[in-house]
Image (tube, grey):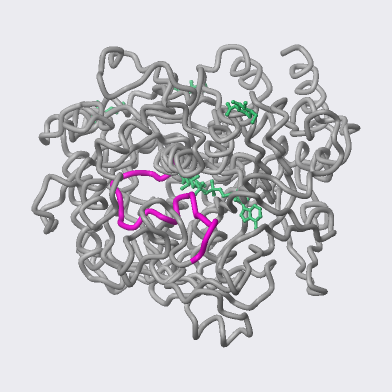
Amino acid sequence: MLPKIYFLLFLLIGTLTCDEGVSDDDSYEEIEVSADGESRRGKLLWSYHPLLELVMKVSGNSFIYKGNGDFFNFIRDSYPLPNGRTSPLPEYDFVIVGAGSAGSALASRLTENRNVTVLLVEAGKPEMLLTDIPAMAPYFQATDYTWQYYMEPQPGVCMGMENERCFWPRGRAVGGSSVVNYMIYTRGRPQDWDRIAADGNYGWSYNEVLQYYMKSEKASLDGLENNPYRNKEGVMPVEFVPKRTKLIKAFLEAGKILGHPTTDYNSPHELGFGYVQTTTTHGHRQSSAKVFLHKHKKRRNLHILPETTATKVLIDPQTKTAYGIEFVHNRKVYTARVRKEVILSAGPIASPQLLMLSGIGPKDHLTSLGIPVVQDLPVGRTLYDHICFPAAIFTLNTTNVSFKESRALNLKTIIDWLRDGDNDLSSPGGVEGIGYIKTPVSDDPEPVPDIELISIGGSIVVDGGPGGSKAVRKGMRITDAVFNEVLGAIDNSDTWSAFPMLLHPKSVGYLELKDANPFSHPRMYGNYLTDPRDVATFVASIRHLQAMAATEPFQKFGAQVHRGRYPKCRDTPFDSDAYWECAVRTFTATLHHQIATCRMGPAGDPRAVVDPELRVHGVNKLRVVDSSVIPRTVSAHTHAPAVMIGEKAADMIKKTWGLLKS
Ligand SMILES: Cc1cc2nc3c(=O)[nH]c(=O)nc-3n(C[C@H](O)[C@H](O)[C@H](O)COP(=O)(O)OP(=O)(O)OC[C@H]3O[C@@H](n4cnc5c(N)ncnc54)[C@H](O)[C@@H]3O)c2cc1C
Ligand SMILES: *[C@@H]1O[C@H](CO)[C@@H](O)[C@H](O)[C@H]1NC(C)=O
Ligand SMILES: *[C@@H]1O[C@H](CO)[C@@H](O)[C@H](O)[C@H]1NC(C)=O
Ligand SMILES: *[C@@H]1O[C@H](CO)[C@@H](O)[C@H](O)[C@H]1NC(C)=O
């Protein structure tokens, strides 16, 4: 506590003496990554907020794994090898690639048995003090805590984003995307998982996955103490966000008026609206790393290598058996062998990429890139994502009701937050509530929602104005020109918005390799809104928001839908369906829930990559354990599902190798 405050004082002095506007040269860091003689130059931007910028700069270039002389170690977590080891072993029982939501949980559970050795390799760095601040969530999307992926150009979506391309940042850290995400905790509806099981995925019905959701969970949710679906004894904290604006009350009240009860939306029988539940403790982020790895650093059998990138799974082509991985650390290539299994937990983009680089994927595609084929499988051929529309914004006639960055982020609030965790900084990017609705255009025969509404104590204009970081719009890669034209008139004013998120898109995307270089990004095709039903669902959700805004709880604040002047929508009359379609096509924002690229399905399923025990079809000793295996869209943000997958996989793997305590 005390050293942290000194550090913050130092920061304050730093920010005061530093020029506010950092010169272009300073805000870029060029890194060079090379492998196989190939090289790529990455440009990393960290120029959003003076505080963040400074910390990134002073602590950005350390190699935790190698040294212990990093002055800023006390604000950055570290994972030295246990027992003073300086290098990893040549062989482990298991090697796990990726310390994300799923991989961290899996590594932790497997090493509960001290006879089992695990090597966990992670491309990113450990988290640090600022990543713990929920309100800073939007700031990390352009730092080296994320992979800066872009979707391939698709005409007619993301029209207001830079170069009209959709930006797909993903976490790159010990803790993976759970270090940069919005911490929203959701499990999905029972029907989602029951349908997955009905496709032949034994063990994945709602009741079966529920025990794994509950196994992780350490709920501290006021009013839900006796709820039989919530566990208070697990390891992963889930709580209500301590700080709220008046707008969340209005959201819940308006919901009730329109027939949506305030419920625990994570309980199976209850569909409705509620305060957002987050993976935080007293307003501090609890990433998968903090929950599953941080406490177990001293386990002799768990070796964690940050800043280490796996480049290939080593597979014997004759026996089709995985026997290790190749990885790059500090520009050197190493191998690690396994006695038992290789497990890919590199997430929905990198897991399929690694499979394909290792010869597992669509035969013609691999052949065209000169990659010898080990197993012909539809890797990457299915890709679903959750997109939202962040600009259904309602202006208010009342001041000081919404969050304001200008009011929130300063030295005093950071110190208060460190001590009590209950001020504006505890808010996950302003998210206060979520609500599930089934719009009139849904064709689902069961009570499965088609839209999640994410209520914000404000909107994407909260960080604007003079001196504002504009982190949210920058994180979404919205261009200044389009932002100013559509939202300039209400920038930094008091507003309410809710992002409608399309839960079950009918449009399906895919991804493939760009080339055989492991440091290239794959080519990702979202195919957003290619099915007209997805557009209709968005329009219906905006109508629902307008109906909410028209109720008394919002009219008290004089809520009025903002009339944006969308540059590409000038021919559409304001508030027509066509206007809203065009608006959605201008601001098409991913919620970063890409799934299904290593789809799970039983043998004989032509779209399946892994079987219901997550073993790669036709290859021995190789599994995929992360959100890429989720075969169908689920009514959930995907962090808790990924953790659940890690928990469930740990038991399946222990069972395979006789490691389950009876
Ligand atoms: C900005 C953002 C906001 C989000 N908000 C929410 C939210 O509020 N609630 C929610 O439930 N979900 C949210 N999500 C989604 C959720 O965080 C992810 O779906 C989930 O974390 C995925 O878990 P995973 O284990 O599949 O992959 P990840 O957590 O992404 O982990 C994969 C890890 O593998 C590493 N890796 C990749 N390639 C290699 C390699 N070659 N070698 C070594 N390591 C490698 C990566 O660096 C990463 O750390 C958000 C995601 C993002 C990016
Ligand atoms: C670990 O291995 C030893 C020696 O093989 C064995 O006696 C012991 O029971 C094992 N422990 C566990 C938890 O499996
Ligand atoms: C709004 O908050 C600001 C800053 O705290 C304050 O100066 C102002 O008087 C407030 N306005 C109203 C109408 O309460
Ligand atoms: C805002 O508008 C509503 C509805 O018109 C009105 O009742 C309320 O008094 C207004 N509030 C302010 C502060 O003007």
Using the image, determine if residue 455 lies above or below residue 352. Answer: above
Whole-percent x, y for residue 94 in the image: 62, 46
Q: Is residue 33 left or right of residue 507?
A: right
Q: Could you tell me what secondary structure mostly forms the magenta stretch?
A: loop
User: Which residue is drawn at the image coordinates 41% and 57% (left, top)?
Assistant: 595
Does residue 631 belong to the magenta stretch? yes
Q: Quadrant of the N terminus?
A: top right
In-front residue for pair 37/427: 37
Magenta stretch: residue 212 in it? no
Rendered location of residue 346, percent (x, y)? 57, 53
Q: Determine if residue 536 is in view.
A: yes
Q: Quadrant of the C terminus?
A: top left
Q: Which residues are magenta?
A: 619-639
Task: Tell me the residue at 34%/61% (across/down).
Answer: 584
Residue at figure coordinates x 37%, y 53% from the top left: 630
Tell me, yes or no, if residue 464 can be seen here.
Answer: no
For the point 55% across and 29% down, which residue is it? Answer: 285
Where is residue 232, by image quadrant?
Answer: top left
Q: Residue 655 placed where, x, y %?
A: 45, 39
Residue placed most toward the observer, 179 or 195: 195
